[in-house]
Image (cartoon, rainbow, N blue to C red):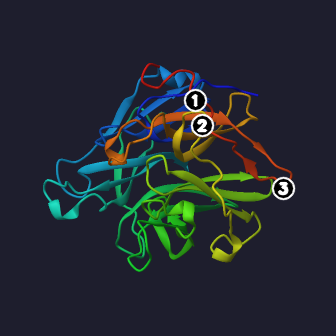
Amino acid sequence: MTVYENPLLLKQADPFIYKHKDGFYYFIASSPQFDRIELRRSTTIDGLRTANAVTVWTKHEEGPLSCLIWAPELHYIEESWYIYFAAAPSEKAHPEHKTFQHRMYVIRNKGENPLEGEWEEKGQIKTNRDSFSLDATVFEHKGTYFYVWAQKDPAILGNSNLYIAEMENPWTLKAKQVMLTKPDLEWEMRKIPVNEGPAVLKRNGKIFITYSASATDENYAMGMLAADEEADLLDAASWEKVQQPVFQTSDQNEKFGPGHNSFTVAEDGITDLLVYHARDHKTGGGEALNDAGRHACIQPFHYDEKGYPVFGEPVPNAAPASTV
């Protein structure tokens, strides 16, 4: 089985790796400064460690896209590249906004190589509710594109729930928007009740959505939803919620708060890989978002007799992240 040394990249939270038809792996994540969007690419995963990071978009000086650029994802839809991300207004300009005022946005590049060419702002991805929203991902199923994201409903306890909708086009959602899960299990509500960071995996006649829950410190952990590929994906009843975390802190391996994952495939074209961030230390009760020590990691996983993914536990780092 393919083995990679971890961490893959330092201080790269919310990592997303996409293998394109051109043979390149594309890497994108939250910049530790939260002020830009960077891309890097390589024909191998290990090559991403030394690949040049190219800044393709920078936050605005003012307005709704001027602060805390979070969790970008790169997708290729209908012969164009799209980056979905969340942004907030400047706290200096709007101190009353605090941290959790994000909305979701998308930019487009029609070129062959997304590290080159021009990125066009396509605006805000608007939902049926104007509230804190972030962590969008996109997947195609039977010719239809679906958008999955995290958003706050003031009537529900917690920071965010997960929702799904069909897409009218890559920057517009259709009206039917369905909540798939809210934080209602003990392990999803440690310090902060939250469901966020969805990632989609289609395998073995199923569609799996992993997500992350609880505060972004060592309490952070991954959960999972599953639906039959023939089911109505816009019917919440089609989705089974696994009751226990599927990936969580390993004290023994010194990997804390693994989550906000994505999926890719190894160079052999067969081995499925879990991409995630984790800390190599506990935050000591401080504000986790101010600690940049979330490092991108990657490891293979397998499936059980039901065809469900089995992620195991976070593998230990090859060396302490501070010295890698």
Q: Dot 1 surroundings within 10 Å: few (below 14), some, or many (20 or more)?
A: some
- Amino acid beneath label 3: Lys
Q: Is residue 79 visible?
A: no
Which residue is tagged 1? Answer: 24
* Of callouts 3 and 1, the N-terminal one: 1
What residue occupies the far bottom of the structure in this picture? 155
**Residue 132 vertical position relative to residue 66 in the rendered view, above or below:** below
Q: Is residue 149 visible?
A: yes
Gap between marks 1 and 2 measured at Cα: 6 Å
Which residue is tagged 3? Answer: 306
Residue toward you, 206 or 120: 206
* Circles 3 and 1 in contact, beta carbons < 8 Å: no
Residue toward you, 150 or 121: 150
33 relative position to 136: left or right: left
Residue at 48 percent of width and 33 percent of height? 280
* Circles 1 and 2 in contact, beta carbons < 8 Å: yes
The answer to which image quadrant residue 116 occupies is: top left
Query: Which callout, 3 or 2, points to the residue nearer the camera?
Result: 3
Which residue is tagged 2? Answer: 20
Instruction: Please state the horizontal and vertical placement of residue 163, each as a whole percent of the image.
Output: 52, 68
Instruction: Please state the horizontal and vertical placement of residue 202, each as a whole percent of the image.
Output: 71, 53
133 relative position to 148: left or right: left
Residue at 41 percent of width and 65 percent of height? 159
Q: Which secondary structure, mark 3?
A: loop
- Amino acid beneath label 1: Phe
What residue occupies the far right of the structure in this picture? 305
Query: Which callout, 3 or 1, points to the residue nearer the camera?
Result: 3
Instruction: Please state the horizontal and vertical placement of residue 217, each as a whole percent of the image.
Output: 44, 47
Gap between marks 3 and 1 measured at Cα: 32 Å
Q: Dot 3 surroundings within 10 Å: few (below 14), some, or many (20 or more)?
A: few
**Residue 268 vertical position relative to residue 110 in the rendered view, above or below:** above
Q: Dot 2 surroundings within 10 Å: few (below 14), some, or many (20 or more)?
A: few
